[in-house]
Amino acid sequence: MEGALTRRLKVEEAKRMVARIRPWRLAGRYIYRSVKTRDFAEALKLLNRIARVAEEANHHPDVELGYGYLRLRLTTHDAGGLTVRDFSLAERVERVISLWSRGLRGRRRV
């Protein structure tokens, strides 16, 4: 099974898979996503939540963190491109972002 997870995907496969996890986008050998946050501290909190999921998966995004934003980029370096592992982690990360986003909306009403 490990071989199937780490086999580099063909472009058409990657296009089909990224279409299922919007707002993730395809850019060559990567998929990426940006998240707007209120400030640096909120971006860091979100990154820490994502880091736990990445550690569990033993697969880690490239990250850019700044005031009011978090940018994530996934690829499987060992495979030289995208694999199923990237899309699996992106789906898990998207769930984290969704829960984080709902929590923010709840706090704004208070």
Image: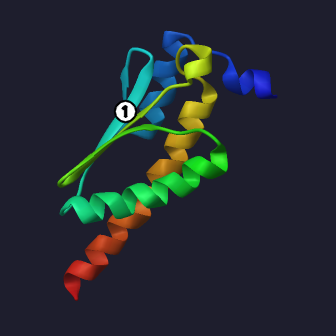
In-image side of 68 versus 51 (left or right): left
Q: Report which quarter residue 9 is drawn in.
A: top right
Q: Residue at x 17, y 54 (%)?
A: 67
Q: Position of residue 46 (x, y in %)?
A: 38, 60
Q: Position of residue 92 (x, y in %)?
A: 54, 49
Amino acid type for the residue under numbered disc 1: Tyr
Residue nearer the viewer, 50 or 102 = 50
Q: Report which quarter residue 89 is drawn in.
A: top right
Q: Residue at x 55, y 57 (%)?
A: 52
Q: Position of residue 101 (x, y in %)?
A: 33, 64
* Quadrant housing the N terminus: top right
Q: Residue at x 18, y 62 (%)?
A: 39
Q: Is residue 54 above or below residue 84?
A: below
Give the residue at mark 1.
Answer: 32
Q: Secondary structure at mark 1?
A: strand
Q: Residue furthest right?
A: 1
